[in-house]
Amino acid sequence: MSLSLLRSPELHRGAVCLAAIGALILLMVFYSVVSGAVRRADAQRRAEVQLQAAARAAADARFAARPVFIIQSQSRTPPRYVPRAVAFRTAN
């Protein structure tokens, strides 16, 4: 290449255009990678929410299937706090 060819404005415009196209391609690749990662994270989050909901529903169903017994028992030990009469003195 001759020195006069390197100074031509068409060559500079072509280099700038080529750099712009390369930058646009890199931007599209980056966007594609980030978009795929976001989609994958969203799908994983939804699956986790559904799994938690299914586990909660299974636990609720297991609890609902158990029979409930009401046991009324008399306690053999007296309560620790028994209210009693207290004499109050008035202030002088």
Image (cartoon, grey):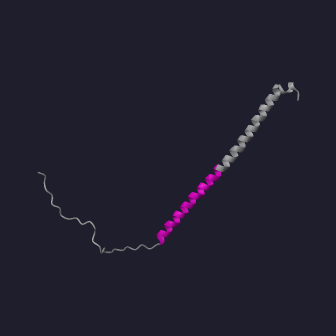
Q: Nearer the viewer, residue 74 or 2?
A: 2
In which quadrant of the rendered view does residue 16 lie?
Answer: top right
Q: Residue at x 18, y 64 (%)?
A: 85
Q: Is residue 32 left or right of residue 92?
A: right
Please say if 54 is above or below 32.
Answer: below
Please say if 90 is above or below 29.
Answer: below
Residue 26 point in image, percent of width and height: 73, 41
Residue 29 point in image, percent of width and height: 72, 44
Q: Residue furthest front?
A: 92
Q: Residue at x 54, y 64 (%)?
A: 55
Q: Which residues are magenta?
A: 38-65
Q: Nearer the viewer, residue 46 or 23?
A: 23
Q: Is residue 92 left or right of residue 46?
A: left
Q: Residue furthest left?
A: 92
Residue 75 point in image, percent of width and height: 31, 73
Please say if 32 is above or below 3.
Answer: below
What secondary structure prevails in the magenta region? helix
Q: Is residue 67 left or right of residue 3?
A: left
Q: Quick check: is 51 in the magenta stretch?
A: yes
Q: Quick check: is 58 in the magenta stretch?
A: yes
Residue 62 point in image, percent of width and height: 50, 69
Q: Residue at x 82, y 27 (%)?
A: 10
Q: How many marks?
A: 0
